[in-house]
């Protein structure tokens, strides 16, 4: 039997991923303790795969910071999180690397190991900060719960391979 193909970039390698949600507010607790929050802005779920590099983190951070998904006075999506002075809550999420092509249980073997993933996740957050975005985070590797009020809802899936030539 044939199995559906995994999403891949033109080189056949899966890359750093983000689920981008426009929110009125979001907060995360880690192991039952408050960890991070944001007001009007973006909730980002960030997944890292073994092939990712600092360049992937930089590409994704730049695109997200400049992505025009907030409405202007004419009710058109023309403003970025930077334009509105919004904030970001970035939460690491290895499950974005799930392979669901075989059976009914997701496989996470294509997710980067924690010793490689955490530095790239941190680099991604630092790249957003360097662009002028206020960023708070969850706790890498912790059991986390997210409380969010989506705005729109606007939810976008992105990966660094989309913009990498």
Image (tube, rainbow, N blue to C red):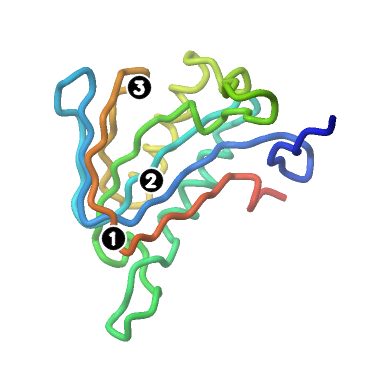
Give the residue drawn at x 45%, y 23%.
119
| Residue 82 position in % (x across, y down) | 32, 61
Asked if marks 1 and 2 touch (Cβ < 8 Å), the reply is: no
Give the residue drawn at x 47%, y 52%.
62
10 Å crowding of disc 1: few (<14), some (14-19), many (20+):
some
| Front label number (1 vs 2) | 1
State the residue lying farthest toward the bottom.
74
Of marks 2 and 3, which one's residue comes earlier in the chain? 2
Relative placement, left or right, of 161 versus 91 is right
Q: Nearer the viewer, residue 63 or 112?
A: 112
State the residue lying farthest toward the left.
33
Q: CA distance from mark 1 to mark 3?
A: 26 Å
Q: CA distance from mark 2 to mark 3?
A: 17 Å
The vertical placement of 65 against 47, above or below, is below
Corner quadrant of residue 23: bottom left
Q: Which residue is mark 2?
A: 128
Q: CA distance from mark 1 to mark 2?
A: 21 Å
Q: Which residue is mark 3?
A: 140
| Residue 140 position in % (x across, y down) | 35, 22
10 Å crowding of disc 3: few (<14), some (14-19), many (20+):
some
Q: Which mark is residue 151?
A: 1
Q: Which mark is residue 23?
A: none
The vertical placement of 29 against 42, above or below, is above
Of marks 1 and 2, which one's residue comes earlier in the chain? 2
**Mark 3 secondary-structure assignment:** loop
Corner quadrant of residue 27: top left
The vertical placement of 111 against 11, above or below, is above
Give the residue drawn at x 32%, y 86%.
74
């Amino acid at each position: 039997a044939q199995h559906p193909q995994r999403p891949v970039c033109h080189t056949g390698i899966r890359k750093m991923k983000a689920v981008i949600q426009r929110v009125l507010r979001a907060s995360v607790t880690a192991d039952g303790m408050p960890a991070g929050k944001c007001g009007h802005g973006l909730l980002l779920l960030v997944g890292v795969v073994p092939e990712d590099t600092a360049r992937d983190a930089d590409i994704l951070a730049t695109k997200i910071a400049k992505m025009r998904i907030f409405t202007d006075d004419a009710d058109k999506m023309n403003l970025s999180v930077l334009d509105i002075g919004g904030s970001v809550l970035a939460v690491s999420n290895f499950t974005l690397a799930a392979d669901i092509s075989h059976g009914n249980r997701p496989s996470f073997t294509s997710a980067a190991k924690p010793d490689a993933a955490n530095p790239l996740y941190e680099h991604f957050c630092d790249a957003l900060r360097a662009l002028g975005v206020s960023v708070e985070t969850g706790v890498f590797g912790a059991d986390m719960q997210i409380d969010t009020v989506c705005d729109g809802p606007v939810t976008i899936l992105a990966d660094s391979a989309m913009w990498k030539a």
